[in-house]
Image: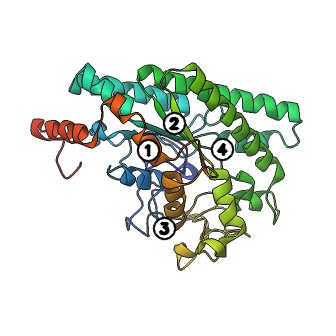
């Protein structure tokens, strides 16, 4: 599995780049629920890609940029908090173009280590999971307070165009199975409710997210018809998160409007910052959001379960478990194949069994 995305998918890559404290989560109380220390994940514990990896028998993610991480047979996670699709949106984090560049480096390393044939089989059978666009739309809304519909459509077209180019680059490397998490309900996040000083969801952000998601559906269908062997799913992160925000008790939560950690009316900002007095809830499992824009581990468990085995009202045209199995006879990659490759790396001394 190879992971591309922003803060909801970052396992700690931003620990290794020169960015502001606002782009990091390497301080308490992040990580308190599961890891018991801040890993760099913008969450109290595990994130959706961790659970997705576990479903397919892979370990929890180590950041791609971790200098001690050399085990790319199991995949790599390039996610970066603040990571945008467009380079100019946030030049201080790992944008999509750079994430794809890293993917190309990994593909080259795999070919060196495994040989062209084995590496090609691995890349063809892998899942390419992504969560992209939210950072760009929040930046756009901050810089363009009252855009016209034409301006919004033009911006969405640019963002989707860049995602499409990235997908084609990965396809050229051998990637065939793509799992797209669509843009979540940005306007319903505590940070944005607080920033816009509203109790309801911010309409502009909701509109941008919905427009993006509609175009993403269309483009994914077009890619499937244009690129031989291209398979995909779209996970409706927008709806699944919004439902829990609007009806938290229905899903076992007590609070969907206010974050567990932070300051301000919705605890939407400043979680853990040493320079800001912040509040911290006693039980993150009762909250949908841990901080102003990121789900708790408890929410991520539910969200990943829907990605894995949800019906077509939440993930279409198939779910992740079906995407994993799809065309398995054609790609000739199985758990047994991966185990053999891992054993080869252990025997060569490149990686310890514990790290695998």
* Marker disc for residue 134: 4
Q: Earlier in the sequence, mark 4 or mark 3?
A: 3
Residue at the limit of the structure toward the left, as seen here:
347
Quadrant position of residue 127: top left
User: CB under 8 Å between callouts 4 and 1?
Assistant: no
Q: Disc 1 on helix, strand or loop?
A: helix
Q: Earlier in the sequence, mark 2 or mark 4?
A: 2
Nearest the viewer among 202 and 164 is: 164
Does 77 sit left or right of 159 as displayed? Answer: left
* Marker disc for residue 87: none
Does 315 sit left or right of 215 as displayed? Answer: left
The CA span between labels 4 and 1 is 18 Å
Mark 3 Cα-neighbour bin, 10 Å: few <14, some 14–19, many ≥20: many
Disc 1 marks which residue? Answer: 13
Where does the image place residue 196, in percent across and percent down from the top left? Answer: 80, 57
Q: Quadrant of the N terminus?
A: top left
Where does the image place residue 345, in percent across and percent down from the top left? Answer: 17, 37
Disc 2 marks which residue? Answer: 94
């Amino acid at each position: 599995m190879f992971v591309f995305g922003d803060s909801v998918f970052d396992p700690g890559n931003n620990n290794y780049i020169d960015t502001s404290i606002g782009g990091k989560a390497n301080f308490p109380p992040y990580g308190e629920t599961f890891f018991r220390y801040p890993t760099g994940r913008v969450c109290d514990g595990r994130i959706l890609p961790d659970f997705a990896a576990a479903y397919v028998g892979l370990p929890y993610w180590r950041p791609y940029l971790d200098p001690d991480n050399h085990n790319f047979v199991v995949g790599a996670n390039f996610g970066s908090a603040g990571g945008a699709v467009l380079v100019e949106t946030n030049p201080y984090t790992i944008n999509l173009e750079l994430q794809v560049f890293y993917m190309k480096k990994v593909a080259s390393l795999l070919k060196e280590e495994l040989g062209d044939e084995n590496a090609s089989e691995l890349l063809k059978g892998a899942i390419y999971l992504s969560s992209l666009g939210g950072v760009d739309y929040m930046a756009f809304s901050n810089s363009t307070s009252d855009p016209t519909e034409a301006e919004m459509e033009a911006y969405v077209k640019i963002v989707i165009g860049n995602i499409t180019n990235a997908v084609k680059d990965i396809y050229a490397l051998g990637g065939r199975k793509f799992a797209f998490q669509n843009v979540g309900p940005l306007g319903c996040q505590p940070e944005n409710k607080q920033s816009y000083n509203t109790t309801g969801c911010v309409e502009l952000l909701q509109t941008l997210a919905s427009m993006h998601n509609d175009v993403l559906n269309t483009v994914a269908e077009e890619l499937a018809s244009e690129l031989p062997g291209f398979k995909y799913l779209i996970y409706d992160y927008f709806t699944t998160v919004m439902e829990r925000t609007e009806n938290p008790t229905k899903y076992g939560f007590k609070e969907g409007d206010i974050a567990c950690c932070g300051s301000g009316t919705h605890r939407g900002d400043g979680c853990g910052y040493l320079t800001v007095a912040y509040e911290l809830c006693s039980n993150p499992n009762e909250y949908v959001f841990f901080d102003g824009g990121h789900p708790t581990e408890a929410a991520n468990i539910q969200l990943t379960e829907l990605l894995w085995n949800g019906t077509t009202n939440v993930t279409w045209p198939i779910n992740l478990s079906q995407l994993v199995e799809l065309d398995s006879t054609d790609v000739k990659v199985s758990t047994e194949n991966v185990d053999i490759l891992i054993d080869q790396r252990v025997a060569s001394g490149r990686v310890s069994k514990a790290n695998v």
